[in-house]
């Protein structure tokens, strides 16, 4: 009960702060669905692409700093 | 209050109607103060007592965000209306006239159409009782999102009234107090059916003007039927082309309208900012009129006693010093401050211990503290005689109705302490006490309040458009009637709820309001203040004793 009330209060705060509170219900649904889809896309993109980008960035930076001895050793080997 | 204690005269003045001013002149107290400089000690004290705290940055960001989203939806709805998917409830031209020059300007009503209409059930609420400390509100609902309303037939009884300008509680229907009003109505009727210049000049009007002049401590005064019209119709008679008007940033619409109608040049100085005013004065005196550099015919400084949207008090001693130095004229609009401030209710001149002869034109209204209607202009006899012939309002407007005139007369006599009664002083003290208590408790709870500590107008900042509307609706649910104001009456980021305290509010009513404010403030996260306020023990008295004289 307490958690449900708290979530309802949070939703109410969200309505007040974004100004959605004054709109008609169908407009509220449009805005909520747009916001929800945008957030979902952001989460999906970050889930799929952020680890790959992070790994590539780490490889790039380690390539710069410790790169000279590694590449010559690779050449020799 | 310390100033009156130093003066030492308060009680004896109840019986001597106009003698307080002469007494002040005799004991020389206020003269000494003026010689000390442009009220420097008064200025620093006022500075400490006024506060205009700024909200944290995230509040401004969220306000703009809210307005931005609703504006986007406004464009969307306008598009739907233009395409024809949605029915347009507003006025439109006929089909045959679509090719003509447009009669109804679509874009200028954008804000009204798309924001105000959605939430307009919070304004123009019909009341069906006396606007005293409690009143009855008619319940109305809307089936089509506030385009049309219908009454359910129910009435909400005993809603606490925090919006009426009923500062001294004279909006009452107690038959004992209203006896003289009833007598005059039966003697004169209700309609005057003429203007002051023709046949509408009754003897009670003369009596009222004499009384107002004595009350304010000036030579003579003139009364008009409507407060707004007093400003807008008399300023054109005082200044014209070739004159300069220096008006405060947040002046009332009536002053702005009067200034524009007069044809004088208008320059605006920052609100209550004496440096800005002095800069403008120096520039005006040095450079003169814009192209010809001739000296200005007249320079008129227009200020208000209490500014109704900010709750701040004018810095009267400093303005008087500036006015004397640069030889300008001063117009003070005491609509909210007459009767409500000052130890005996004489307005800002009494509060700051200033000689009323220093203010050239004193204007005020009877709507607020006297519970009647109309306005007055008071000053030197030559000024008032000139206005009697030259002002539009005096010549063409119908004069005050007899019961209204008698109500003003009886309210003023009550405040002045007629027949040694202490009712007037009791009310003034009650208002001062209510003001101090209410403001202190709200600050302590953590709301941002604007204005001076002694001003009975209390604006509480709400900032976000969604919260403003929700606040008004929630308070009405809890049986408290409040007035909320947003853009365009206030700057766009500073929407507020304005509370007007009254001498008729009892401590229990104020406590009830404060209790609900506390709950609503927690519910909506409205407590933005970042200052620490310690809770004072003398504010919370459990016994509910009221201070009576």
Image (cartoon, helix red, strand yellow):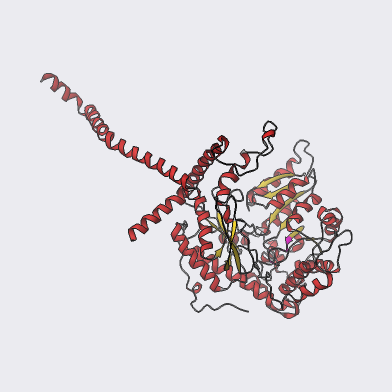
Residue B318: tell me if it is visible: yes
Residue B213 at x, y percent in the picture: 79, 66
Q: In the rendered image of this protein, does residue B531 appear above or below residue B266?
A: below
Query: So how many labels did they put on this image?
Result: 0
Q: Residue furthest right?
A: B198
Point out residue B9 in the picture as x, y percentages from the top left corner.
69, 75
Residue B1 visible within the image: no
> Which residue occupies the foreground of this view, B76 or A43?
B76
What quarter of the picture does the C terminus of chain B occupy?
Answer: bottom right
Majority secondary structure of magenta residues: loop
User: Residue B378 magenta-drawn?
Assistant: no
Q: What residue is drawn where x is 19% and y is 24%? A: A68
Instruction: State which quadrant residue B140 falls in.
Output: bottom right
- Give B330 or B208, whichever is nearer the viewer: B208
Residue B281: % across, % down: 70, 47
Q: State the extent of the magenta-drawn residues as a range.
A: B364-369
Tell me which corner region of the image, top left, top right, bottom left or bottom right, holds residue A66.
top left
Query: Is the N terminus of chain B in the top left, top right, bottom left or bottom right quadrant?
Result: bottom right
In the image, residue B112 lies at what x, y percent?
A: 60, 46
Q: Is residue B151 left or right of residue A22?
A: right
The residue at 88%/58% (across/down) is: B197
Residue furthest to the left: A77
Q: Is residue B141 left or right of residue B38?
A: left
Front one among A12 and B547: A12
Query: Residue B502: which quarter of the image?
Result: bottom right
Asked if residue A7 is positioned above or below residue B543 in the image, the reply reads above
């Amino acid at each position: 009960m307490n958690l449900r009330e708290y979530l309802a209060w949070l939703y109410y705060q969200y309505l007040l702060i974004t100004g959605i509170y004054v709109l008609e219900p169908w407009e509220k649904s449009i805005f909520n669905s747009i916001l929800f889809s945008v957030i979902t896309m952001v989460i999906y993109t970050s889930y799929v692409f952020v680890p790959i980008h992070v790994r590539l960035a780490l490889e790039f930076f380690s390539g710069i700093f410790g790169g000279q001895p590694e590449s010559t050793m690779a050449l020799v080997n | 209050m310390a100033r009156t204690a130093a003066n030492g005269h308060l009680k004896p003045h109840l019986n001597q109607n106009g003698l307080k001013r002469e007494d002040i002149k005799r004991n020389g107290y206020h003269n000494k103060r003026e010689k000390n400089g442009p009220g420097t000690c008064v200025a620093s004290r006022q500075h400490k007592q006024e506060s205009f705290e700024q909200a944290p940055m995230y509040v401004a960001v969220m306000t703009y965000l809210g307005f931005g989203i609703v504006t986007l939806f406004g464009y969307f709805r306008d598009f739907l209306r233009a395409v024809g998917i949605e029915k347009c409830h507003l006025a439109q031209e006929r089909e045959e006239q679509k090719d003509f020059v447009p009669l109804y300007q679509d874009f200028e009503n954008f804000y009204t159409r798309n924001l105000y209409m959605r939430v307009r059930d919070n304004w123009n609420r019909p009341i069906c009782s006396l606007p005293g400390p409690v009143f009855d509100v008619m319940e109305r609902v809307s089936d089509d999102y506030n385009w049309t309303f219908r009454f359910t037939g129910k009435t909400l009884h005993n809603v606490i009234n925090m919006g009426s300008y009923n500062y001294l509680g004279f909006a009452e229907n107690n038959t004992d107090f209203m006896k003289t009003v009833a007598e005059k109505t039966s003697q004169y009727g209700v309609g005057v059916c003429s203007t002051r210049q023709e046949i509408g000049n009754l003897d009670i009007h003369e009596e009222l003007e004499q009384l107002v002049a004595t009350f304010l401590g000036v030579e003579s005064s003139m009364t008009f039927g409507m407060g707004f019209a007093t400003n807008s119709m008399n300023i054109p008679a005082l200044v014209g082309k070739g004159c300069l008007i220096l008006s405060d940033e947040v002046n009332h619409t009536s002053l702005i309208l009067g200034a524009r109608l007069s044809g004088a040049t208008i320059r605006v100085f920052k609100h209550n900012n004496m440096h800005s005013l002095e800069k403008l004065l120096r520039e005006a005196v040095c450079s003169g009129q814009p192209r010809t550099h001739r000296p200005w015919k007249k320079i008129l400084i227009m200020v208000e006693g209490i500014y109704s949207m900010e709750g701040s008090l004018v810095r009267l001693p400093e303005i008087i010093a500036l006015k004397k130095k640069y030889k300008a004229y001063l117009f003070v609009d005491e609509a909210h401050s007459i009767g409500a401030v000052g130890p005996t209710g004489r307005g800002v001149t009494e509060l700051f211990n200033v000689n009323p002869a220093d203010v050239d034109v004193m204007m005020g209204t009877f709507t607020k503290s006297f519970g009647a209607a109309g306005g007055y202009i008071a000053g030197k006899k030559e000024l008032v005689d000139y206005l009697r012939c030259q002002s539009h309002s005096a010549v063409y407007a119908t004069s005050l109705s007899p019961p209204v005139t008698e109500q003003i007369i009886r309210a003023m006599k009550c405040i002045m302490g007629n027949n040694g009664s202490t009712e007037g002083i009791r009310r003034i003290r009650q208002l001062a006490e209510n003001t101090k208590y209410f403001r202190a408790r709200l600050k302590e709870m953590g709301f941002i309040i604007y204005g001076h500590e002694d001003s009975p107008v209390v604006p509480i900042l709400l900032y976000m458009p969604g919260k403003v509307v929700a606040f008004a609706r929630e308070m009405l649910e809890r049986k408290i009637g409040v007035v909320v104001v947003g853009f365009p009456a206030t700057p766009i980021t500073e929407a507020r709820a304005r509370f007007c305290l009254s001498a008729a509010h009892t401590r229990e009513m104020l406590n009830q309001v404060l209790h609900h404010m506390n709950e609503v403030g927690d519910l909506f996260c409205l407590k933005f203040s970042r200052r620490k306020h310690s809770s004072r023990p003398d504010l919370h008295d459990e016994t509910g004793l009221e201070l009576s004289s």
